Amino acid sequence: MTTVTPAHSPASTGKRPPAEARTRRRSSARRRSTPLTIAMLAVLAYFLLPLFWLLIASTKSTQDLFNSFGLWFSHAPQLLSNIKATFTQDDGVYGRWLLNTVLYAGVSALGAALLAAAAGYGFAKYRFRGHGAAFNLILGAIMIPTTALAIPTYLLFAKAGLVNTPWAVILPSLISPFGLYLMRIYAEDAIPDSLIEAARMDGAGELRIFLTIALRLLAPGLVTVILFTLVATWNNYFLPLIMLNDPNLYPITVGLSSWAAQAQNGGAGASSDMLALVVTGSLISIIPLVLAFLLLQRYWQSGLATGGVKQ
Amino acid sequence: MMTATAAASPKGQRRDGPTRPGRGGTRRRRSAGPLFIAPFMALFLLLFLAPLGYAAYLSLFQEKLIGGSTFVGLDNYVTALKDPLFLKGIGRVALFFLIQVPVMLLLALFFALALDSGLLRLARVIRLGIFVPYAVPSVIATLMWGYLYGPDFGPFAQISRHLHLPAPHFLSDSWMLGSLANIVTWEFVGYNMIILYAALRTIPAELYEAAAMDGAGAWRIAWSIKLPALRPALTLTLLFSVIGSFQLFNEPKLLMSVAPDVISSSYTANLYAYSVAFISQQTNYAATVSFILGLVIVIVSYAFLLTANRRRTS
C-alpha cells in the first residue's frame, strides 16, 4: 500500500512514461457509456443548481426574489444596479469586507504554506533528536478540530488583548498540520538528496539551499497548500465571528451573514431591500475562489494526489 | 496517517548515508533541521497547545458571585456529562455523522470510480462541476439552500404549488437534520471525490493490463484493485468527515434565523459551546464543553484510524 507513488510528482514521472498513460486513456476512449454520462449530468445539475439560482437571483430586486419563479429571470433584470447597491450600502462596507477577506486569507495562506514548507522540508530531509515525536505530535493535531479550539483561543486572546484585531483571525490560521503533512511527503519525493548534497559541495548554506532550490521544487505542493488554506480562511466563519465585533474588520462571511440577519428582520420579506444585496454580495464573493481553482487545477490536483495516497 | 513515519523511516536511513561523512558541515547540518521546524513549532505550541492547556485550566474553575473564580476540580465535567442540552447536541451530531458521512463518502467513491472508468463523456466538466461547491463558503451555501428550501418562495415550493402538490417542509423539525445533511453533502462530496480520484489516477496501468489478461472485468478490477488501493485515501476522507461532522456549526447557526423554532441554541454541541460562551457568558463552562467536544472527536478519529490500521496489517 505504501509503495504506490503519486503519478504527478517528479519522482515518479520516470517510472510511468507518459506514453503509457496515453495508451490507457486511448484504450478506454473506445467505449463510452451514454447512460452513465446522463446519470452523471443529472448529478452535475444538482451541484450546479444552487449556483444557477444565485446567478439568476442576483439579477433581481428583492421584490422579484419573492414574486418571480426562483429558477428563471424576472421581467426586469438589474444585475448592474444590484452590484452598485451592494458596494454603496453602509458607506461601501462591502468593499471593506472584500479587502479584509483578501488580506486575512492571503496573509494566512502564504504564511501557513511557508511555515508548512519549511517544517515539512526539515522533517523530510533532516534527522534529529525528537524527530519522530515532534512529527507525531503535529500529526495528532490534525484531529483537533479548529472550532473546538476557537473558544479557548478566544479566551486566551482576550487575555492578551488581541481580540478585535486582524491578528486574532490571522494567527490561528497560520498553523496547518495537514499542510505540513502534505509538504513533508511532497518534499521526500520531489527533492533529490543528491541535489542537496551537490549544493552543499558548492558551499551553499542550508538556508540558501532551501530558499533557492527546495522551494522551487516544492512549487506544486506549495500551490496546493496555499489554495486549500486560502479556501479554509476565506470561508472561515466561526473564528472571525467570535473574534471580531467591529463591522469594519469583518471578512465577507461574517459581513454577509450580518446582512442576511438584517434582511430577515427587515419585515416580512419584500419590504426590505437587503436580500438582493446579500444575494449579489454572495455571488461576487465566490467568483475569486472558483476562478483560482479553475486556473490552478493542474497543480492542486497533483498535490492532493500525493497526500491521499502516500501513507 | 499513523503509518506515515513508519513508511518514511527506511528511506530516511538510506538518506542518512551520504550525509554522514564527518566533513566540517555535519554539526551545522544537524542543527539546521530543527531550525526549519522551529517557526512552525513555536506557533504550534502557542496556538494549538496553549489554548488547549488554557481550556483545561479554565475548566477546573467556576465563577462565583462572591469570591470570584474558585477551584472546583472536575465539577464542570460532571455537570457537562449530565447536561441534557449538551448530551442532546452530541447525540444529534453523532446521528448526523452516521447518516451523512456514509452517504457522502459512497457518493464521492461512486463519482470518483465513474470518472476514472473512462466511460464518461465530458468527464472534465463533470469533475470540476461537482468540485466547485467546495470553493463556496458554507455561509453562502447555507444562505442559498436556505432560500431554495423556503416554504413560501423557494423554487421547490413554487413548483409543487404549481403542480397542486403540498409544498415540502424542508425546514420543519423532522426534515431539518436531513436538510442540513444535504447542504454539507453538497459542499463536500466534490472535495472527497477529488481526493479519491487523485488516488485512483496513481494506480499503475500495468496492474489493469495484468488483471485484464487474467480475465478480470471492470467490476472485478474496481473491487480487487481500485478499492484496496483507495484505502489510505478513504481513511483520510473519513478522518476529515469525523472532524467536520462533530464540529457542525456554520450551517445550523445560519439556518437558525430562518427556522428559529426548529434550531435551538443547543442544536449541535458546537452551537451549544458558542451560546454558553457568548450568550450566557459562562467562560469556564464553555471551556469545559469545548474541551470535551475536542476529546470526543479525537477519540472517535483515533478509533477509526486504529481499525483502519489493524485491517491493513492483518
Image (cartoon, coloured by chain):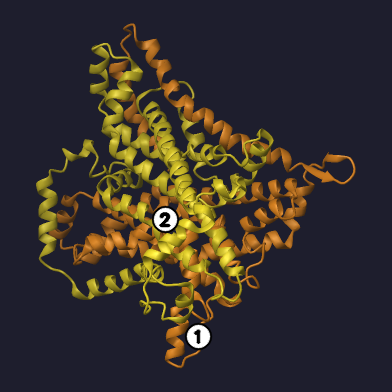
Which residue is nearer to you in this view: A172 or B226? A172
**Which residue is identified by label 2?**
A285
Front position among marks 2 and 1: 2
Q: Residue furthest right?
A: B66
Q: Looking at the image, how many numbered discs can be counted on the residues?
A: 2
In which quarter of the view is residue A58 placed?
bottom left
Q: Colour of chain B?
A: orange
Q: Residue A229 location in percent, x, y?
A: 42, 44
Q: Residue furthest top?
A: B24
Amino acid residing under circle 1: Ala
Q: Residue A86 location in percent, x, y?
A: 46, 60
**Which residue is identified by label 1?**
B167
Other-residue count near label 1 (Cα within 10 Å), few / some / many at <14 / 14–19 / ≥20: some
Cα separation between marks 2 and 1: 31 Å
Name the side, left or right, on which A108 lies relative to B216.
Answer: right
The chain ID associated with circle 2 is: A
Image quarter where the C terminus of chain A lies is top left
Q: Residue B110 location in percent, x, y?
A: 32, 65
The chain ID associated with circle 1 is: B
Other-residue count near label 2 (Cα within 10 Å), few / some / many at <14 / 14–19 / ≥20: many
Q: Secondary structure at mark 2?
A: helix
Query: What is the letter of the yellow chain?
Result: A
* Residue under the image location 38 percent in, 70 percent down: A78
Q: Secondary structure at mark 1?
A: loop
Q: Residue B99 location in percent, x, y?
A: 50, 67
Which residue is nearer to you in this view: B144 or B268? B144
Name the side, left or right, on which B56 lies relative to B167.
Answer: right
* Residue under the image location 65 percent in, 54 percent down: B274
Amino acid residing under circle 2: Ser
Which residue is nearer to you in this view: B267 or A24? B267
Q: Is residue A282 visible?
A: no
